[in-house]
Amino acid sequence: MATALSAPVSTATVRVSNIPPSAVAKELLAFFNSAVAAAGEAYACEIAAARRGWLSRGNGSVQFDSTATATLAAELASSGRLPRFLGSLLSVSPAPSDLLPRAPDLSLRVADARLLVGNRVAEREFEVADSWDSVCVEVIPGKRRIDLYLNHDTQMYKLEVFFEDIRNCYQCSFDGAGAILLQMRFVEVKCDLIVSFEEKDGVQTNSRFDMHGVQALI
């Protein structure tokens, strides 16, 4: 039977039980992706399997693109509106952590930002040492860090910036685009970061990114 929610979903992941033995992760992901299509999408999933025959043990987890989408999936199950999966009525409940480290909400995620590394030498002056375009940004409160994915010399790199390494966080603008200035605590080398939200055809991309929310978290 579907289980009523005992607590609000605080991550983008839910626990799922009563999964049929023959089910595979690809089928479960596609099922939830269809169920929440009006609000978002399923991002990742896993099914616990027995070693003998690698059949489902009946439970697993599904991660969605946001906490709002995960909440919808749980509400559909608790209200009996979630369709049967391969003939089984799934039980859905909040998970304490995400399957993969990722920003739990679209307002904490940027798909196309510009990263500038350098020093703030005056109130309105930033000396740029290097920069990268098309940077993906994930603010992950549960891990207390910001993940930045960037391409350099045909290689993809991930830069992890932990909240405790940030001395100050300010909203600013750079070349006319909205941005956030991160002043770091590094002792050996003075280094500041600017994450700039690029504009295309005069329209700022990533308009849902919550700069006030990020400042409050840090």
Image (spheres, grey):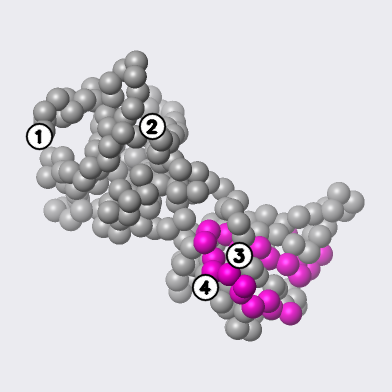
Identified at 52% across, 61% down, the residue is 10
Q: Which residue is mark 3?
A: 94
Alpha carbons under labels 2 and 1: distance apart: 23 Å
Amino acid tagged 3: Pro
Q: Mark 4 or mark 3, which is nearer the start of the sequence? A: 4
Q: Mark 3 or mark 1, which is nearer the start of the sequence? A: 3
Picture coordinates of residue 82, whole percent (x, y): 62, 79
Choose mark 3 or mark 4, whichever is in front. 3
Amino acid tagged 1: Arg
Alpha carbons under labels 3 and 2: distance apart: 31 Å
User: Magenta segment, principal secondary structure?
Assistant: loop
Identified at 56% across, 77% down, the residue is 75
Picture coordinates of residue 98, whole percent (x, y): 57, 53
Choose mark 2 or mark 4, whichever is in front. 2
Considering the numbered disc 3 on the image, is that residue within a helix, a strand or a loop? strand
Please report contact status of discs 1 and 3: CB closer than 8 Å, yes or no. no
Q: Report which quarter residue 151 is drawn in.
A: top left
Q: Badge 1, how many Cα within 10 Å: few under 14, some, many 20+?
A: few
Amino acid tagged 4: Leu
Please name whichever residue, 154 or 15, is drawn nearer the observer in this view of the structure. 15
Picture coordinates of residue 149, whole percent (x, y): 41, 37
On-image quarter of the C terminus: top left
Residue 108 in view, yes or no: yes
Numbered tag placed on residue 165 in the rendering: 2
Q: Which residue is mark 1?
A: 124
Q: Which residue is mark 4?
A: 72
Picture coordinates of residue 172, whole percent (x, y): 17, 43
Chain part drawn in magenta = 1-25
Q: Mark 4 or mark 1, which is nearer the start of the sequence? A: 4
Q: Mark 2 or mark 3, which is nearer the start of the sequence? A: 3
Please name whichever residue, 192 or 91, is drawn nearer the observer in this view of the structure. 192
